[in-house]
Image: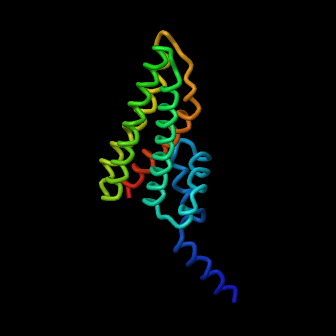
Amino acid sequence: MKILLVILFISLSFANPSLGDLIEDVCRNSNNYKFCVKALRADPKSSSAVQKGLTRIMLQLSLAKAKNIYNEVLILLNQTEEAVLKQRLQICKDNYDGAVDHITSSIEYLDANDFFSAASFATDVVDDSSSCEESFTEPPIRKSSLKPKSDEFLHFAVITVTLIHLLDNL
């Protein structure tokens, strides 16, 4: 009886070399493990997703964040009268409009298994977010009310690039 249990345990360990779940395994490769796990676990589809599916979920989460920030920028643009702040917000509007386009393209390339192009467009998203915030640090310096949301979005974007690169290495 003990021999059967040992054989069963050994065979199960070979069938599933990773005793953790896929979300944890994938997120260990990201620059922010806790953020990655929390973001993916928030989506109910992630529990049954394969690695490509998790990457797509992260792209979709990034797309939703980019659209939300873009819409907030539109509101702020309509509310502000200050020329310098309006100029900075216009830069952010253009950057987040680009981010939405880049994420959409990245999803299309991911679906087509063109991981190189998907990663390229996802990398552009990182630049889009950074450029928005950098515009507020140029003289005359203005405070960005978007910073907390931009920082969170940047986490999504960087993790997404990592997840796409992992697919390219499969």
Q: Position of residue 118 (x, y in %)?
A: 34, 48
Compare residues 38 and 4 and report the one nearer the observer: 38
**Residue drawn where x is 53% and y is 24% of the image:** 79
Q: Is residue 91 left or right of residue 69?
A: left
Taking depth in this image into account, of 135 and 4 the one nearest to the observer is 135
Residue 91, position as x, y percentages in the image: 41, 25
Farthest-out residue, top: 140
- For this rendering, which residue is in front, 105 or 85? 85
Side of 6 relative to 108 (left or right): right
Expressed as whole percent of the image width and height from the top left, the position of residue 27 reads 54, 51
Total numbered badges shown on the rendered structure: 0
**Where is the C terminus found, in terms of image quarters?**
bottom left
Furthest residue toward bottom: 1
Q: Quadrant of residue 101?
A: top left
Residue 143 picture location, percent across and down = 56, 19
Image height of 12 relative to 133, above or below: below
